[in-house]
Image (spheres, grey):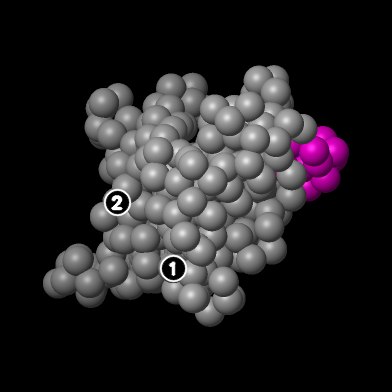
Amino acid sequence: MTHSPAEVAAMLVNLAVSKHRQRPLALFLKAFNAGVFVSFGGLMSLIVAGGSPTLASENPGLVKLLSGFVFPIGLVMIILQQQELLTSNMMVFPMALAKRAVPWWGLPRNWFIVFFGNLAGSLFVSLVLVRYSGVVSSEPYVSYIKAAVIARCINPSWAQVFLRGWGVIGSFASRSGQQGMTAKDVTSKVVAVWFPIWAFVACSFEHVVANMFLMPLGMSLGGGDLTVGQFIAKPIAYGNFVGKYDGSSCRRRTGGQALARRRA
């Protein structure tokens, strides 16, 4: 048994209301945890892809499938443990605003706190648990990480990065979260979330929080002389937002009749 689209839409709005009512410190700590979880998924993906140079040269598509398969563990942990991920909130808060369930200032407040919480958690894993522990500081991982930074953040144009950010959220990540809400049992939630996330990683789309882990790690290893300014200038977050807004609009149109008009 699953929830109907209308029920999922109402659940997403109510979820935004509960997020809005959280205290700032609790919100930040949950966002920190989410950054950690996404980073561990990214680390597993790096270990699979970076540790398979021979297979990658002979069958790069298979390596992408394998590295994409292990990445969703972080997103699954976030959903099951109800942590705070920026891109998830990019979907639910516009829905709640459209139904006047939260005040207008609740959106920038939530996104600001969650953004920096996700960033802090990602930097902690990237620069402390990974870089300074040396778990990927040898070959072939160093070369792979440097090449990944160049391929994902230096070589692509502004428009290409924006579209990659839009594609992942509009086509995959939004749908994975909605599918997870549709399921009623844990096993179904895991399966519903896993496959869309696997697909976007295998297709090389971009996720802003995942890059909060990868890009600082690459910069610490000297990848492509990427600077903080260049990383910030890349419109991954903007593309993610547009994709999430598109996903929330679609959900609002398909399930809006049953949305509870609640005010925080």
Q: Give the side of residue 201 with respect to residue 27, left or right.
A: left
Mark found first going from the N terminus, 2 or 1: 1
Name the residue at the left extreme: 58
Query: Percent position (x, y) of residue 44?
Result: 48, 67
Amino acid carrying label 1: it is Ala
Residue occupying image coordinates x 49% and y 69%: 2
Q: On the image, numbered disc 1 is attached to which residue? A: 192
**Quarter where residue 247 is shown:** top left
Quadrant the C terminus occupies? top right
Q: On the image, numbered disc 2 is attached to which residue? A: 204
Pair 2/1: label in front: 1
Taken as a whole, is the magenta stretch helix, strand or loop? helix
Query: Percent position (x, y) of residue 141?
Result: 41, 62
Q: Give the side of residue 198 with respect to residue 64, left or right.
A: right
Residue occupying image coordinates x 64% and y 35%: 261
User: Would residue 210 be visible to someone looking at this image?
Assistant: no
Magenta-highlighted residues: 19-29
Q: Give the side of residue 114 with respect to residue 44, left or right.
A: right
**Quarter where residue 20 is shown:** top right
Residue occupying image coordinates x 55% and y 65%: 76
